[in-house]
Image (spheres, rainbow, N blue to C red):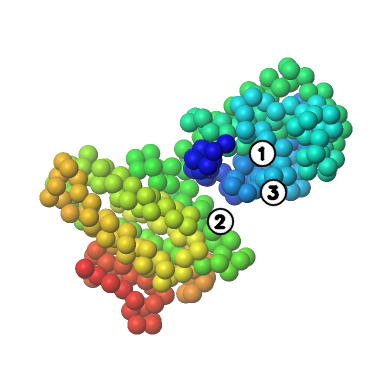
Amino acid sequence: MNDQHEQERLSALHALDIIGAPREPALDRIVRLVRMEFGARHAGITMVDRKTVVFAARDNISNKSMPRGDSFCNIAIQNDEPLVLHDTLLDSRSMSHPQTMAGIRSYAAIPLRTRDGYNVGALCVYDTELLALSQSKIRNMKQLALLVMDCIELRRLAIQDHLTGAMNRRGFMTELDREMYYHDRRNAPLSLALMDLDHFKQINDRYGHLVGDQVLKSVVEVVDGKNEDSQIIGRLGGEEFGILMPGQDGAAAFQRIERLRGMIESIRLPAVPDLRITASFGIAEAGSHAKGTSSLIANADTGLYRAKSERRNMTVLVPRLQEGDFSRAH
């Protein structure tokens, strides 16, 4: 697998937004069915990331992840056909593999393939004893692997705004809750920006809703095109968006949003070249004045309200308001 293909494969994996997502009951049921079908001790759905293999669902498996090189699933994604190891001690592909050394004797996996043709993980079953890995059972397992990808794709669509491609409110709030959990446990920097497109109703009234839709899509393309450090954008309603910035403190978030604000101001739509698009932003940093999800949103909303009520096309960082008004307007 060359570096370019691997990077594209990782992009396809991350676009599914399945790693670290809340457990999906449908996937748990599929894994349980696979384990029962083979009479095996263990079954799971894995996602093969850059350095780790993460379980999106698992049955009778205690680990949530493992090093990529230690997993048979890393071999499984290299080909489109099922990987079937009837006896790991006798198969040349597995004789010296870490999982064989750990006691695994039988293993079978079906690559999980995206619509674009990238193997992002595997549906696998294994045991410390020899399993009857018959062709008929493997065929059934292949059908279940297709069902796994259907479930993952449907989940992604359920949290995606159909117009802009950004997360919808439900998906964004789930991500915010998850990032706040990580922040509370690790005390890692986290900032939230709320964005409102200035005078958007006037754009719709003057140019029509088709142009308004193009404005929304163009803004999301600009923000999503700066997808650095796991930046996440969600459409919260109408012309209001949230931008979640894990790993960014307030000062860094301010600088990032200022760059985005300038890029939005530079958007020109060929059909209406005279249209000027601007946006107002409010930013809050978790762990400063914000001590929870609701407080973080409220503080960012306070900043957004000030930006809109003063001059618009403006960025306001709430935690700095009592330390010298760290804001900028044009």
Closer mark to the observer between disc 3 and disc 2: 3
Q: Is residue 255 visible?
A: yes
Which quadrant of the structure image shows residue 210? top left
Mark 2 or mark 1: whose residue is earlier in sequence: 1
Q: Callout 2 environment at 10 Å: few (<14), some (14 to 19), or many (20+)? A: some
Considering only vertical position in the picture, is 266 above or below 7?
below
Which amino acid type corresponds to the residue marked 2 in the rendered image? Answer: Arg
Considering only vertical position in the picture, is 267 above or below 24?
below
In the rendered structure, the answer to whether residue 280 lies left or right of residue 49 reads left
Q: Nearer the viewer, residue 55 or 103?
A: 103
Question: What residue did someone put label 2 on?
Answer: 178
Which amino acid type corresponds to the residue marked 1 in the rendered image? Answer: Asn
Which amino acid type corresponds to the residue marked 3 in the rendered image? Answer: Pro
Q: Position of residue 169 (x, y in %)?
A: 43, 49
Label disc, if present, on residue 196 of the rendered structure: none
Which quadrant of the structure image shows residue 209? top left
Q: CA distance from mark 3 to mark 2?
A: 23 Å
In the rendered structure, the answer to whether residue 22 lies left or right of residue 259 reads right
Tally of numbered tags: 3
Q: CA distance from mark 1 to mark 3?
A: 10 Å
Q: Callout 1 environment at 10 Å: few (<14), some (14 to 19), or many (20+)? A: many
Question: What residue did someone put label 3 on?
Answer: 67
Mark 3: secondary structure: strand
Q: Position of residue 266 (x, y in %)?
A: 22, 55
Label disc, if present, on residue 74 of the rendered structure: 1
Closer mark to the observer between disc 2 and disc 1: 1
* For the residues bearing labels 1 and 3, Cβ distance under 8 angstroms: no
In the rendered structure, the answer to whether residue 161 lies left or right of residue 214 reads right
Q: CA distance from mark 2 to mark 1?
A: 27 Å
Q: Position of residue 111 (x, y in %)?
A: 63, 31
Q: Callout 3 environment at 10 Å: few (<14), some (14 to 19), or many (20+)? A: some
